[in-house]
Amino acid sequence: MRRISLFILSSIIFVFLLLINLAFGSVHIPFKDLFQIVFLHSSDSTASSIIWNIRLPRILFASLSGAYLSVGGLLLQVFFRNPIVGPYVLGISAGATLMVGIVMLVGISIGLLGIHPFYISISAAFGALCVTALLVSLSSRVKDVVTLLVIGLMMGYLCYAVTSILITFAEKEKVKGFVLWQMGSFSGIVWKEFYILLFSALFLSILLSIIKKPLNAFLLGEEYAKTMGVNIKLLRKLIVIISSILAGLVTAFAGPVAFIGIAVPHMARLLFKTSDNGILIPASAILGADVTLMCDLLARTLMSPVELPISSITALFGAPVVIFLLLKRRATI
Amino acid sequence: MKSVLKTEDLCVGYGKKEIVSGISQRILKGQFVSILGPNGSGKTTILKTLAKIIAPIKGRIYINGLLLDSLSSKEVAKNLSAVLTERPSPGLLTGFEFVSLGRYPYTDIFGRLTQRDKEKIKEALKLVNAEDLSERYFGELSDGERQKLIIARAIAQDPKLIILDEPTIHLDPKNKIEVLNILYRLSKEKGITVLVSLHDVDVASRISDLVILVKDGKIIDFGPPEKVINQEKICKLYDLKDVHFNSKLYTFELLKNNSRKEIFVIAGAGTGTPIYRMLLRHGFGIITGIIHENDIDFHVASSMRLEVISEKAFQEIGKNTLKKAFSFIDHAKAVIDSGFPLGSLNRENVELIHYAIKKEKQVYTLRKREEAYELYRDLSKKLIYLNDFYSFLERA
């Protein structure tokens, strides 16, 4: 009962946040106009185009991103049985950052003067994919999941090392753009990018509904899971693939978004009071959407018209929440 | 009878490092089998190999007549379940949810529980007397309660064989006995074969159908405990030097040290045992008598390698035995009357007290004054009365 009402409550909050996000920004659009624009498609050209072309795709993308990162973080926290793990722990964002760094800093911009955002997305996705492919190929060979975790962490360090060398030799203006990209932002998201996320969500929810069962068995640790009939090698691959898609897609379009993936699974556990992944996966998704929408609203409005990087808000908000929840919690994972 | 578990020339270890080799065993349905051996002897490695957590170096394992290697992990899980030393901590699962994980090999791809699954879970909870834990969070429970749920989970997996690695190690005596009792009932009532590694030789000897002794990379012996467990083997198994294992009582006793402050304890019917233990701990030398060879005090004293003056079972105490006892009293520092029951066969023990008083030895008694008077008459005035045997330490 408690869980159902929590789901309903967080959905209501979600709708509420959607409306607020649509209304507020550098241009304020009153709710009355908002309804007319969204539901009646009345076309006061500026307001309508702000809503339809800028805010709506961005907001929808941000909420799905929050859901993705939170679920990705949850999967890896359970898989590694470690509460401070997030979706980027396997080096996904480091791989993406390195590739974006190569494109933005070294300037392989294929003759174009400015770098089209599309190339940045492609290179980020490619970087994430490389790291994922390497991890998948190693995942069945390593002795235990901790080794896999360490390999992921080390790959992250390697990528960052190369990135820092690139930064050292890069021009100042390029560095600023790159640093800002590294802190993530949902600005400039277009419908196409949202559709990619939405389409993958269908595919991912099937995978997630299947992975819930072995993931629950994994709560007892890898050895117990083996004796219960879990196909460990397959599960390792699936976890790496799913969590990489979840984090990689978001990173490709919005850059690395910190903290959502670490903080939200803890919030879900403590609010819903369960370790059952069948409940935690949807709970993390909806809470992730809520939290991200709130953070994006703050990022857009706090210093308006200057927009803050999303990671600065998520960390400011997330770090204290995680500390508070961890101090309050009674039991692990 | 069909064997539930069979190994042929099995060699277990990690990578190429052999830990235990030459394991050829056959375990039948419903048997309770204990593996005994010192820490680091490879018990865990054997159990993990049998549970298909690690691969064997060589040899074959058959579960229910089927080669373990040829079974899928799901089929293995339907045949055997495990309780490992690794302590799981899914804090926010309820007892019921925790046990339901045992249904893993039976549920559909989404992990949904059917009515039958739920019944199996309830049955498992009932078997371990943990029905009251089904709504409580795992993280809030005590070690004993958690262990019961961990075992219930293994039962819910509906296996033919349960493998347990030191399931009683963190438990207090009550929980230890309860857990072992549950396992014993599983094997006898449900016909589930139980293979367990234990450190309690005494308990293992009492409840096992079969014990397997592991040491120095091989199985040094196996068979029914009555055949396998004896003083020599247990001392060898655990490299015991200052401890004695009594294979009739299945108890460990410290061995006598070479102190010279010797105390003569007149004992019988178990009244001497706590006194021996206390005196030994405090470094006294002990002589005891005159006790019959069918007396518990005799077995305990012999285990401790004390000087025992004894008479054959059910015989009256002979003159020679009495003389021998007198000569020991001559050299003793003090005499303790343990308050043993006095009957027609051990009446001569009163003579010992007479003799000790005559020799001006200090004679302590644990009897009440009235009782001593009835037994010893005038002699009773010369005794030193103790409320309990600890007060002897304060006086001596």
Image: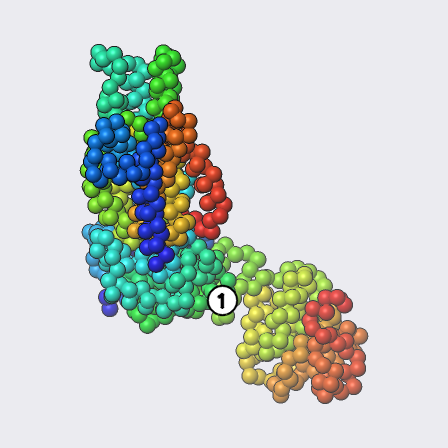
State whether residue B30 is above or below residue A55: below
Quadrant occupied by the N terminus of chain B: bottom left
Amino acid type assigned to the residue bearing label 1 in the image: Lys
Q: Is residue B285 left or right of residue B149?
A: right
* Residue at left offset 60%, top offset 71%: B273
Residue that carries the numbered disc 1 in the rendered image: B174
State whether residue B247 is above or below residue A213: below
Using the rendered image of the protein, determine whether residue B350 is visible from the camera's viewpoint. Answer: yes
- Closer-to-camera residue (B182/B395): B182
- Closer-to-camera residue (A66/B227): A66
SS for callout 1: helix
* Residue at left offset 70%, top offset 77%: B366
Chain of the residue that carries numbered disc 1 in the rendered image: B
- Specify few, some or many for label 1: CA neighbours under 10 Å numbering under 14, 14-19, or 20 or more: few
- Closer-to-camera residue (A178/B110): A178
Q: Is residue B269 left or right of residue B173?
A: right
On the image, the x and y values in percent for residue B387 come to 72, 75
Q: Is residue B388 left or right of residue A275?
A: right
On the image, the x and y values in percent for residue B61 come to 26, 54
On the image, the x and y values in percent for residue B235 come to 49, 59
* Residue at left offset 23%, top offset 58%: B106
* Residue at left offset 41%, top offset 52%: B91
State whether residue B181 is above or below residue B60: below
- Residue B167 sits in quarter: bottom left
Number of numbered tags placed on the structure image:
1
